Image: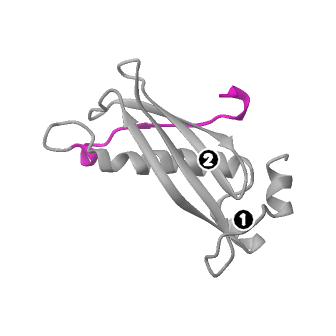
Amino acid sequence: MNDQKVSSVELVIPFADIDALRVVWHGHYPKYIELARSALLANHHLDVFEIEKIGIGLMVYEQHCRHTFPLFYNDRVRIDAWFKCIGVRTEIHYRIRNLSHDRGAARASTSLVFGDKQGRMLEELPHEICRRLDL
């Protein structure tokens, strides 16, 4: 991971995210990585509205998450996101850290695809995307 290209968000786990076992329900992790992905893309001037202005879309193709330590109510959490590979199919990796317990909580990845307004996957990365990502 190139730390100069990492975007991070921090949050405090709300009570609404806790399940009957008093840990964060696994279905909330995609929400947390979405926050970090949005920050990463915004840092490259590629948030959803800016991509839309270019005339393309960015869709989640695949997502994985490996849980290594629980998150609890009121824990402070940091989610780091970085590009693993960039292309028509772009991969972003994530590290979720439980700051309250000083432990890694999860590692995740998403594969995203760029598409046209009709939802068809593009065959090559548009020049404007390459420019914004310094490719």
Is residue 53 rendered to the left or right of residue 27? right
Is 4 magenta? The answer is yes
Q: Which residue is mark 2?
A: 91
Outermost front residue: 123
Find residue 8 and report its image quarter: top right
Residue type at tag 2 = Glu
Is residue 53 rendered to the left or right of residue 15? right
Q: Position of residue 16 (x, y in %)?
A: 25, 49
Outermost bottom residue: 118
> SS at mark 1?
helix
Q: Which residue is mark 1?
A: 50
Q: Position of residue 98 (x, y in %)?
A: 39, 26
Point out the tag, 2 or 1, that comes first from the N-terminus: 1
Residue type at tag 1 = Glu
Outermost top residue: 102
Is 7 magenta? The answer is yes
